[in-house]
Image: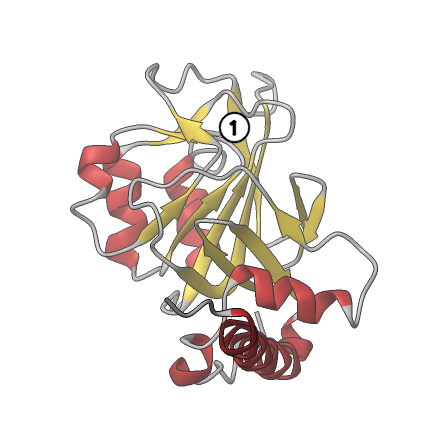
Amino acid sequence: MGLCVNSPASDLISRVSSASISDAMARRFSHRWHILDLVSPTPGAVLHGWAATVRFLPRRDDLRNADVHDFMPATLAAAGEDPSGRVLVVTTGSYRHAAVAGGKKLTLVDALGFSGLLTDGRLRDFDEARQLSGVFYCGGEAVLADRSDLMAFEANAAVELAAALITPGDWIYADAAGAVIVPGDHVQGVLEAAAERERADAAESERIRRTYRRTP
């Protein structure tokens, strides 16, 4: 997690969106950096921070060790000494229907100090999640509890989420439109370009209003 040293300034973050960050990424990279069709207990809330990862895989009874391959130990491993300012990224592979966390597990994420959680799986207990300080984005709300189809196999490793590669130390930004993954050593430049894009777009929109506004 060595890349998580200098966080971008909050005033810079407040001037961008997932769309403008995506535009800035498009000027630099051709790989996939975006994740769509996310759901949140608090729609429109912004989640951002450095990625800490947990990879879930299909359960294998002969390999599973409950002291290692469960949500709590994996989350504690991902948290390290200080998870503040980090986003817990939980990936489920092809098991996106599975509930990876509910009220108690999300409370753990919140109590540890994570900014929130991003997952391609589902979450339960949206009402409880709304009472927490963290922001959570997922593939949908679940009714059924975790049926142990999956096990938390590895923490702090590269993961795949919705066809995008995320490594520990990448920077995550998610809002109502989707999530964007920014390589850790490109964050400042990408956010500055995104903020400039927002400023330029606002100026162009104002020019269009002045030019084409119909007067009574």
- Seen from the viewer's position, the closer of residues 28 and 6 is 28
| Residue 144 higher or lower than 23, as above or below | above
Give whichever of 173, 67 is nearer the camera. Answer: 173
Direction from residue 184 to residue 51 in the image, left or right: left
Q: Choose top left, top right, bottom left or bottom right for residue 70.
A: top left
Residue occupying the point 39% across, 84% down:
11
Q: Is any part of residue 3 visible from this angle? A: no
Q: Amino acid at mark 1?
A: Met
Q: Residue at x 54, y 81 (%)?
A: 203
Residue displayed at 59% across by 57% down: 180
Q: Quadrant of residue 170?
A: bottom right
Q: Is residue 208 visible?
A: yes
Position of 37 compared to 46: left or right?
A: right
Tag count: 1
Q: Position of residue 212 (x, y in %)?
A: 55, 70
**Is residue 34 rendered to the left or right of residue 80?**
right
Asked if 62 appears above or below 134 in the picture, the reply is above
Q: Nearer the viewer, residue 176 or 202?
A: 202
Pointer 1 local density, CA inside 10 Å: few below 14, some 14–19, many at least 20:
many
Looking at the figure, which quarter contains the C terminus? bottom left
Q: Position of residue 105 (x, y in %)?
A: 30, 38
* Local SS, label 1: strand
Q: Classify residue 184 as left or right of residue 14.
A: right
Colouring rule applied to residues? secondary structure
Which quadrant of the structure image shows residue 48?
bottom left
Residue at the far right: name it: 30
Residue 24 percent coordinates (x, y): 68, 71
The residue drawn where x is 39% and y is 20% is 146
The N terminus - image quarter = bottom right
Give the image location of residue 159, x and y in percent: 66, 46
Q: Please name the residue that numbered disc 1 is placed on.
A: 151
Q: Nearer the viewer, residue 146 or 184?
A: 184
